[in-house]
Image (spheres, rainbow, N blue to C red):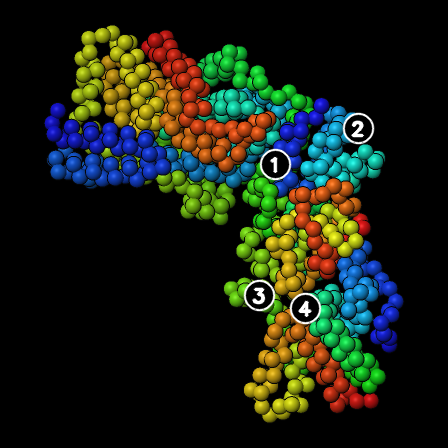
């Protein structure tokens, strides 16, 4: 019997700082290790409707194709030549993998989230090369060699799902201030249920989209 | 050169990414005739870096109202065709006026806030050969306004400059 | 009593009561009280302000600042956060083990560094784990309460753990090794007794969730959140070597050499700051606990004025003249000190009572008097949440952590929630203090 409250608390507590996908993968792995496939089925049944990304990851695990860790190579290639990268939203697995490939690119994580985040620890997690950027300072990261990145949680046609913070940042005026506006599809499949903690936008927000279509 | 409304399908974005500009293949989109690669090729002498060029072309053709994007494409594509037919040599030499990003004033001095395409000033001398203040005013008009306006203006002037350059005459 | 004696004692007691009642304004209250005390002392011919300042035990303030900076250097290595995660992992998120490991760990840490800084860095990790586990109110109250009691005991275990012991060390009343030998074992015994009663009699974990999956997920999340928080090993090694050097110097360098514990601390803190000059400069500029310095400065001025008026000497004389066996007098004094500390908090109580203890020390084994007083003050500072500075800090951090139980009810940690823990801690530590005095004295 899965403790709905316990797992839900863990998801809420970690999703802001680790990212929805990273947290979902972690929870699905732990539940699978503790309770096997029946545990995953129960996890989907009890928490799937509430957490769409968790549901998608659990569904993939049940289908026998666990959601792979996001591959950062294509992102690194798309960012070649960029001197700075401002990230909106956090996905720990993805950023951990990308960071070693960035070379001299300055990395900033915008401190805007609807979920609970300890930004100081978040910064410490990525070392001195990463800055936590206050929301009001995003423009300091713009420029002709600057890139802006957010994570996409699947695509359906031209529609895609992002953390709501993206909507606070993206806009026609912002798109003209960054050489690359990158959407990194880390989930690779659209959620099956209504993604209530995500916001819908269009891929036209981005100059480049990377990840499984 | 083909600038008609039935382009071949765009290749997928290099490096494994896909172009998000679904609009270009969407027949219901009034600007589906646009072919960014035409403008990108035309601007190569002024913006040699491929990614910089993509940036400039994106701002000109992907931002702003549809009529303006479409108009910019038509004018730039026609100018590019003219340059090609005249066999004119584009020159990136000479004084330029940078096209600045619209950054908050307190940030502007801290970041490299100019676009990779600048406005060539040489072609404007044809209109004001001995009047630096008029030249200045013309440049101000051309680089002012929204980024897609200013960059389209700069691109047009660059191509016109190639056509006006006496050394470029066939 | 003379008029200045009455007024100065009233000013001191009013200021101490006011700072206990309005802890959010305690620095202001104490500094204003000190100014009024200096005015009364000057007008009443008791002592000039210059005399009062000359009587301030600057060596104690120097040790306080030096140890605080040394703790900041250690904190910069991120060792406390890693330690907290290590405690959590070692506990396997089992409630009882969690309580025992964190309490024991904080006891050890608090003996060596400023427990406020350590608590500030360890508590968020524990609170995150408690939140992930969805613990109930009772378990949260006892776990957080036990942590505070353990911090107080750790602070009293060594001469550098907390202000009361530092005051004894700085004033030259006790040598470093002397205090350590006498205070270490009773505090360890008190902690063991407190944890035994908590674990086997109170059993705060009896209603805790035993869901292994939740424990696994909680630990996995915690590990992941701290995955890249790396310890600055070179700095940590350097700081630990200096800390060991300080301990050795405090133990081995005789006071007659002219090199007192304050100078040893000053030199040690300086070397620690020089390990990373840029960091050291930043710490000196921004991380000196100026609040504590001003608070104790004001306190010393007030107590100095009262002392100069002769009130404390008279109190000590009255105590000495009390026709009762010495052990009874000492016991009464320690119980009174513990209760007073519960009301006023450790710093003020220790500063005010030390003069009386000095009188008792002439008729009794001084080591027993001073160590007994330190233990009694430790008991008192464990009585109420407001009696130790770490209490309000824990309350604030817990509020911020927004703990909820399995049913979603808010879990709080305030005065009322701490009280049962405090009563147990107070009783156990005071009983240990009295047992120590009666056995050793």
* Comparing labels 4 and 1, the label whose residue is closer to the camera: 4
For disc 4, the chain is B
Q: CA distance from mark 2 to mark 3?
A: 53 Å
Residue at image x 18%, y 16%? C318
Q: CA distance from mark 2 to mark 1?
A: 24 Å
Q: CA distance from mark 4 to mark 1?
A: 40 Å
Q: Quadrant of residue C375?
A: top left
Q: Are marks 4 and 1 in contact (CB under 8 Å)?
A: no
Secondary element under disc 4, as helix, strand or loop, is loop
* Comparing labels 4 and 3, the label whose residue is closer to the camera: 4
In this view, the residue farthest toward the front is: B28
Badges 2 and 1, same chain: yes
Q: Which mark is residue B138?
A: none
Q: Is residue C175 left or right of residue C99?
A: left
Residue C394's spot in the image, x, y percent?
Answer: 46, 31
Residue C104's spot in the image, x, y percent?
Answer: 52, 22
Q: CA distance from mark 4 to mark 3?
A: 17 Å
In this view, the residue farthest toward the bottom is: B130
Relative to the observer, which residue lies in front, C38 or B160? Answer: B160
Residue A65's spot in the image, x, y percent?
Answer: 83, 38
Q: Disc 2 or 1, which lies upstream in sequence?
A: 1
Q: Are marks 2 and 3 in contact (CB under 8 Å)?
A: no
Badges 3 and 1, same chain: no
> Badge 4 is on which residue?
B64
- Whether residue A22 can be seen here: no
> Badge 2 is on which residue?
A37
Residue at image x 86%, y 69%? B7
> Badge 3 is on which residue?
B103
Secondary element under disc 1, as helix, strand or loop, is helix
Residue C347 to residue C436: above or below: below
Q: CA distance from mark 2 to mark 4?
A: 51 Å
Q: CA distance from mark 3 to mark 1?
A: 36 Å
């Amino acid at each position: 019997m899965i403790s709905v409250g316990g797992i839900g608390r863990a998801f809420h507590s970690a999703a802001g700082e680790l990212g929805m996908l990273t947290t979902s993968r972690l929870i699905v792995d732990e539940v699978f290790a503790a309770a096997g496939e029946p545990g995953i089925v129960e996890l989907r049944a009890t928490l799937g409707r509430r957490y769409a990304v968790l549901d998608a990851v659990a569904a993939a695990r049940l289908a026998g194709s666990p959601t792979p860790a996001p591959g950062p190579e294509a992102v690194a290639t798309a960012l070649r030549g960029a001197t700075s990268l401002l990230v909106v939203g956090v996905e720990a697995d993805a950023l951990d993998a990308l960071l070693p490939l960035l070379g001299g690119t300055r990395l900033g994580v915008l401190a805007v989230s609807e979920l609970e985040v300890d930004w100081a620890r978040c910064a410490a997690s990525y070392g001195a090369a990463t800055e936590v950027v206050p929301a009001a300072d995003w423009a300091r990261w713009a420029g002709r060699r600057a890139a802006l990145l957010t994570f996409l949680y699947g695509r359906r046609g031209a529609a895609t799902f992002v953390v709501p913070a993206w909507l606070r940042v993206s806009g026609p005026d912002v798109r003209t201030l960054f050489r690359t506006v990158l959407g990194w599809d880390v989930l690779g499949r659209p959620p099956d249920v209504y993604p209530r903690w995500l916001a819908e936008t269009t891929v036209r927000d981005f100059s480049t989209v990377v990840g499984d279509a | 050169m083909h600038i008609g409304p039935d382009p071949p399908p765009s290749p997928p974005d290099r490096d494994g990414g896909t172009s998000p500009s679904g609009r270009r293949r969407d027949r219901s989109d009034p600007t589906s005739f646009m072919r960014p690669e035409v403008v990108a090729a035309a601007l190569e002498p002024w913006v040699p870096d491929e990614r910089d060029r993509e940036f400039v072309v994106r701002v000109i053709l992907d931002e702003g109202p549809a009529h303006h994007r479409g108009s910019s494409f038509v004018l730039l594509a026609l100018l590019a065709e003219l340059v090609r037919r005249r066999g004119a040599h584009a020159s990136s030499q000479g004084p330029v006026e940078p096209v600045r990003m619209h950054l908050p004033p307190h940030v502007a001095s801290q970041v490299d806030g100019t676009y990779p395409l600048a406005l060539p000033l040489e072609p404007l001398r044809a209109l004001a050969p001995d009047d630096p203040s008029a030249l200045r005013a013309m440049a101000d008009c051309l680089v002012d306004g929204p980024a897609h306006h200013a960059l389209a203006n700069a691109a047009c002037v660059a191509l016109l400059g190639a056509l006006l350059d006496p050394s470029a005459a066939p | 009593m003379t008029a200045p004696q009455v007024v100065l004692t009233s000013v001191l007691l009013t200021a101490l009561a006011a700072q206990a009642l309005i802890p959010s304004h305690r620095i202001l209250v104490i500094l204003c009280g000190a100014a009024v005390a200096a005015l009364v002392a000057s007008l009443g011919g008791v002592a000039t302000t210059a005399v009062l300042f000359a009587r301030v035990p600057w060596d104690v303030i120097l040790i306080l600042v030096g140890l605080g900076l040394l703790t900041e250097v250690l904190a910069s290595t991120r060792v406390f956060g890693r330690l907290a995660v290590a405690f959590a992992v070692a506990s396997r998120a089992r409630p009882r083990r969690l309580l025992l490991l964190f309490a024991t760990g904080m006891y050890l840490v608090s003996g060596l560094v400023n427990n406020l800084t350590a608590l500030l860095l360890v508590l968020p990790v524990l609170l995150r784990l408690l939140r992930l586990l969805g613990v109930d109110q009772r378990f949260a109250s006892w776990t957080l309460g036990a942590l505070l009691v353990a911090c107080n005991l750790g602070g009293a275990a060594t001469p550098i753990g907390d202000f009361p012991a530092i005051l004894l060390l700085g004033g030259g009343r006790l040598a470093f090794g002397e205090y350590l030998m006498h205070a270490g074992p009773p505090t360890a015994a008190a902690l063991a007794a407190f944890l035994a009663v908590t674990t086997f009699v109170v059993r705060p974990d009896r209603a805790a969730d035993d869901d292994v999956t939740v424990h696994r997920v909680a630990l996995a999340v915690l590990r992941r959140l701290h995955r890249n928080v790396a310890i600055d090993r070179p700095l940590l090694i350097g700081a630990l070597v200096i800390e060991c050097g300080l301990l050795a110097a405090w133990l081995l360098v005789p006071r007659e050499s002219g090199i007192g514990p304050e100078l040893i601390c000053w030199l040690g803190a300086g070397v620690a700051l020089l390990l990373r000059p840029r960091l050291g400069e930043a710490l000196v500029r921004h991380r000196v606990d100026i609040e504590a310095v001003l608070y104790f400065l004001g306190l010393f001025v007030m107590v100095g004025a009262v002392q100069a008026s002769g009130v404390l000497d008279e109190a000590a004389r009255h105590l000495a003249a009390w026709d009762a066996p010495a052990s009874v007098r000492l016991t009464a004094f320690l119980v009174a000190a513990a209760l007073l500390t519960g009301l006023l908090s450790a710093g003020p109580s220790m500063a005010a009572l030390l003069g009386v203890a000095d009188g008792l020390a002439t008729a009794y084994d001084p080591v027993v008097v001073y160590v007994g007083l330190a233990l009694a003050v430790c008991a008192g500072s464990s009585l109420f949440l407001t009696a130790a500075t770490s209490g309000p800090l824990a309350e604030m951090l817990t509020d911020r952590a927004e703990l909820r139980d399995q049913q979603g009810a808010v879990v709080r940690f305030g005065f009322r929630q701490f009280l049962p823990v405090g009563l147990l801690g107070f009783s156990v530590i005071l009983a240990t203090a009295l047992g120590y005095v009666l056995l050793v004295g």
